[in-house]
Image (cartoon, rainbow, N blue to C red):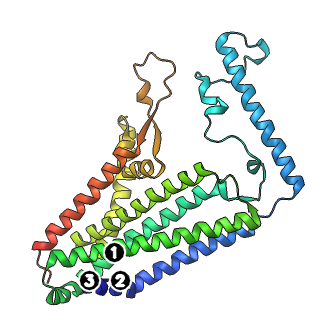
C-alpha cells in the first residue's frame, strides 16, 4: 500500500502530467465556449418551420421507398423510371433507418445534445487516449532514464512488484481522471443543450448507446496507457514510445497501406491497427474492397465488408498484453544501471 501511495505521489507531482491535465481542461473549455457562442435557443417560429421540414423529409423517404417497391414489382410509372433506386429497397426503408429526420436537423446554429453528444464523446476519448499514451510513456521512461527506478529498488528490491505497482497506479489514476473528465464534459454540454440549444431525444436507447461508447472508450484509454508504458519500458526512454508510434503511423498506416493498395491486396484494412480501434469504439466498422465482388454472380454485391468489435478487441488485447508481458520479462533481467 505504501508503494502505491508513493507512486501516486510521484505521478501527480510530474510536471508533464500536470501540463497534460491543464491542456485537457483548456481543450474542454475552448470546445464548450465555442459551442455556447455558436448556439442559441430556437423560438417558436423556428421550431414550427423545422418540424414541418422534418415531416416533409420523412414523407419523401416513405414515397421513395414505395416507388422502389413499385419498380421491383414493375408498376412504377414511366416518368419516374429515371430516378435512382438501390437494388435492395430495404436499404431505404424508413422503418430500418437508424434515425429519421427530426426538427433539430433543420435548425442550423442550434446545438442539440442528443445529436452532438456522441461526436463530442469521440473527441474526448481521442484526447484521453493521447493523454494516457503520453503519460504512461513519460511516467516510466523518465524514471528509467534518470535512475529513479534504481533508487526505488533499493527500498523495495522486487522488480516485478515495483513495475506492477507503477503500471497499476498509472491505470488507476488514468481511469479516475477519465471518469471525472467525461462526467464533467458531458454534463457541461447537457447544460448547454438545456439553456442555449435543444436537449434532443434523450430516451433510454440514447443513454444506452452513449454509455456503450463511453465504456469502450475507457477500455481504449487504459489500453493506450499500458501500451505507452510497455514500449517505454522496453526502450528505457520516453522517446522510444514516441518514436515507435510515429514509425508505425508513417511506415505501416501510410506506407504499407499505399503498397497494399498498389498490389491490390484483399481486405487491407484488416491489417491496420486504426481499423480495429475504430471497430472496437463504434461496435462495427465497414470498409470497401473492390475484390469482394470479383467472381460474384450476385448483382447485389456492393463491395463492402464489416469488422466487428469482438475480433477488434482481441487484436488490441493481444498487442497490448504481448508488449506488456515482454516489458515485464525484460525489466526483470535487464541491467538498470
Residue 321 in view of the camera:
yes
Is 89 placed above or below 160 here? above
Is 153 placed above or below 325 here? below
Identify the residue shown where x is 31% and y is 50%: 315
Tell me the number on the disc at residue 170.
Answer: 1
- Camera-side mark, 3 or 2: 3
Where disc 1 sits, the SS reads helix
User: What is the x, y in percent for residue 307?
Assistant: 41, 41
Mark 2 or mark 3, which is nearer the start of the sequence?
3
Is 4 placed above or below 333 here? below
Mark 2–mark 1 contact, CB under 8 Å? yes
Mark 3–mark 1 contact, CB under 8 Å? no
Relative to the observer, which residue lies in front, 135 or 73?
73
Where disc 3 sits, the SS reads loop
Q: Is residue 137 left or right of residue 286?
A: left
Tell me the number on the disc at residue 1.
Answer: 3
User: Could you tell me how far apart the alpha carbons at marks 3 and 1 are, in whole angstroms?
Assistant: 15 Å
* Residue that numbered label 2 is attached to: 11
Q: Is residue 223 left or right of residue 159?
A: right
User: What is the x, y in percent for residue 21?
Assistant: 48, 79
Identify the residue shown where x is 26% and y is 53%: 318
Quadrant including the N terminus: bottom left
Amino acid at each position: 500500500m505504501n508503494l502505491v501511495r508513493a507512486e501516486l505521489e510521484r505521478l501527480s507531482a510530474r510536471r508533464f502530467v500536470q501540463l497534460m491535465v491543464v491542456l485537457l481542461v483548456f481543450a474542454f473549455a475552448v470546445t464548450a465556449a465555442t459551442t455556447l457562442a455558436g448556439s442559441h435557443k430556437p423560438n417558436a417560429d423556428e421550431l414550427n418551420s423545422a418540424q414541418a421540414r422534418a415531416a416533409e423529409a420523412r414523407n419523401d423517404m416513405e414515397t421513395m421507398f414505395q416507388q422502389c417497391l413499385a419498380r421491383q414489382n414493375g408498376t412504377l410509372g414511366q416518368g419516374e423510371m429515371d430516378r435512382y433506386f438501390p437494388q435492395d429497397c430495404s436499404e431505404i426503408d424508413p422503418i430500418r433507418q437508424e434515425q429519421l429526420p427530426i426538427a433539430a436537423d433543420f435548425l442550423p446554429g442550434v446545438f442539440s445534445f442528443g445529436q452532438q453528444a456522441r461526436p463530442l464523446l469521440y473527441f474526448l476519448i481521442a484526447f484521453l487516449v493521447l493523454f494516457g499514451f503520453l503519460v504512461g510513456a513519460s511516467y516510466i521512461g523518465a524514471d528509467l532514464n534518470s535512475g529513479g527506478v534504481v533508487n526505488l529498488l533499493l527500498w523495495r528490491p522486487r522488480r516485478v512488484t515495483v513495475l506492477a505497482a507503477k503500471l497499476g497506479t498509472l491505470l488507476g489514476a488514468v481511469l479516475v481522471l477519465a471518469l471525472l473528465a467525461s462526467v464533467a464534459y458531458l454534463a457541461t454540454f447537457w447544460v448547454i443543450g438545456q439553456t442555449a440549444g435543444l436537449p434532443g431525444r434523450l430516451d433510454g436507447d440514447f443513454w444506452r448507446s452513449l454509455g456503450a461508447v463511453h465504456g469502450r472508450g475507457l477500455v481504449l484509454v487504459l489500453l493506450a496507457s499500458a501500451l505507452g508504458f510497455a514500449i517505454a519500458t522496453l526502450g528505457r526512454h520516453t522517446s522510444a514510445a514516441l518514436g515507435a508510434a510515429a514509425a508505425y503511423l508513417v511506415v505501416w498506416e501510410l506506407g504499407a497501406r499505399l503498397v497494399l493498395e498498389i498490389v491490390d491486396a484483399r481486405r487491407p484494412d484488416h491489417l491496420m491497427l486504426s481499423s480495429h480501434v475504430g471497430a472496437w469504439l463504434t461496435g462495427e466498422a465497414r470498409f470497401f474492397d473492390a475484390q469482394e465482388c470479383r467472381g460474384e454472380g450476385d448483382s447485389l454485391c456492393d463491395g463492402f465488408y464489416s469488422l466487428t468489435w469482438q475480433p477488434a478487441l482481441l487484436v488490441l488485447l493481444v498487442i497490448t498484453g504481448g508488449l506488456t508481458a515482454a516489458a515485464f520479462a525484460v525489466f526483470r533481467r535487464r541491467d538498470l544501471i
